[in-house]
């Protein structure tokens, strides 16, 4: 939500949370109809994240705001060059490196939407909301139609290591399930060795589904089911 969720850990023991997706899973696959073609939803492959609004969280209102490179590139480049982030996202370097990564998504068919996470009015995290069922990731697990994946990095060191990642993961999964009625599951694939990240997902209402072998890592497939929301 790239290799899968960015960062070292979203939980209380680590600086970031998820890990970026493996390089092989960063490029869009050729599956699935583009917006406007037969079988594609009229409002896009991800049901318009720009219109989802904010979720209430214990830390304040949280919203996903689609990235605008003219406004947001410098901020995201700074985060990507933080050594704690760079180790997982592999996008450290000049602005052109991050710009190309964003442009690949923004110029695509809408199956992956890069967003800033804005908490109480402050941009403080970077997210990728993507159609996992249309992504190369789907080759490695039993994907269902409209499965939605997430990648995340928390930008500032002051926002890391205090359990905020779990709060934001829960809020983001709720936003997806509230606004994507055809989606029955939110998924992520943190590195299996990243135990703090896995713990953060568990605290956010995800469950460990299985261990999967990706081209660049062994991952824990974490799943948040719509059907289990009332049990959390």
Image: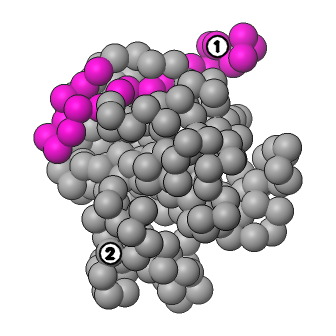
> Viewer-proximal residue, 196 or 59?
196
- Callout 1 environment at 10 Å: few (<14), some (14 to 19), or many (20+)? few
| Label 1 to label 2: alpha-carbon separation | 38 Å
Q: Which residue sits at x=33%, y=31%?
A: 192
The residue lying furthest to the left in this view is: 215
Q: Nearer the viewer, residue 57 or 83?
A: 83
Residue 203 against residue 98 in the figure, above or below: above
Q: Residue at x 67, y 59 (%)?
A: 159
Is residue 32 shown to the viewer in this render? no
Q: Residue furthest front?
A: 13
- Say if residue 49 shows up in the picture: yes
Disc 1 and disc 2 in contact, CB within 8 angstroms: no
Q: Position of residue 186 (x, y in %)?
A: 51, 31
Query: Does 115 sit left or right of 45 as displayed?
Result: right
Identify the residue shown where x is 17% and y is 44%. 216
Rendered view: 109 above or below 174 = below
Disc 1 vs disc 2: which is toward the camera?
Answer: 2
Relative placement, left or right, of 20 versus 163 is left
User: Residue 26, position in %: x, y?
Assistant: 27, 55
- Identify the residue under disc 2: 92
Quarter in which the C terminus is drawn: top right
**Magenta part of the chain:** 211-232
The answer to whether 108 is drawn above or below residue 10 in the figure is below
Query: Would you say residue 225 sits in the magenta stretch?
Result: yes
Is 56 situated above or below 205?
Answer: below
The residue singled out by tag 1 in the image is: 228
Give residue 45's position: percent from left, percent from top: 47, 47
């Amino acid at each position: 939500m790239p290799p899968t969720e960015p960062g070292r850990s979203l939980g209380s023991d680590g600086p970031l949370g998820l890990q970026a997706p493996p390089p092989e899973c960063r490029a869009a696959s050729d599956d699935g109809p583009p917006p406007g073609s037969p079988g594609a939803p009229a409002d896009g492959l991800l049901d318009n994240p720009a219109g989802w609004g904010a979720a209430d969280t214990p830390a304040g209102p949280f919203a996903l705001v689609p990235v605008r490179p003219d406004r947001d590139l410098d901020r995201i480049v700074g985060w990507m060059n933080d050594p704690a982030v760079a180790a997982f996202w592999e996008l450290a370097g000049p602005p052109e490196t991050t710009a190309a990564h964003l442009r690949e998504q923004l110029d695509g068919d809408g199956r992956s939407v890069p967003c800033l996470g804005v908490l109480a009015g402050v941009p403080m995290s970077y997210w990728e909301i993507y159609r996992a069922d249309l992504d190369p990731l789907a080759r490695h697990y039993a994907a269902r139609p409209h499965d939605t994946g997430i990648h995340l990095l928390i930008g500032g060191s002051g926002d890391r290591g205090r359990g905020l990642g779990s709060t934001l993961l829960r809020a983001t999964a709720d936003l997806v399930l509230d606004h994507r009625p055809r989606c029955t599951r939110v998924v992520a694939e943190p590195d299996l060795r990243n135990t703090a990240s896995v713990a953060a997902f568990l605290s956010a209402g995800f469950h460990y589904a299985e261990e999967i072998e990706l081209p660049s890592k062994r991952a824990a497939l974490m799943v948040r089911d719509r059907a289990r929301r009332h049990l959390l």
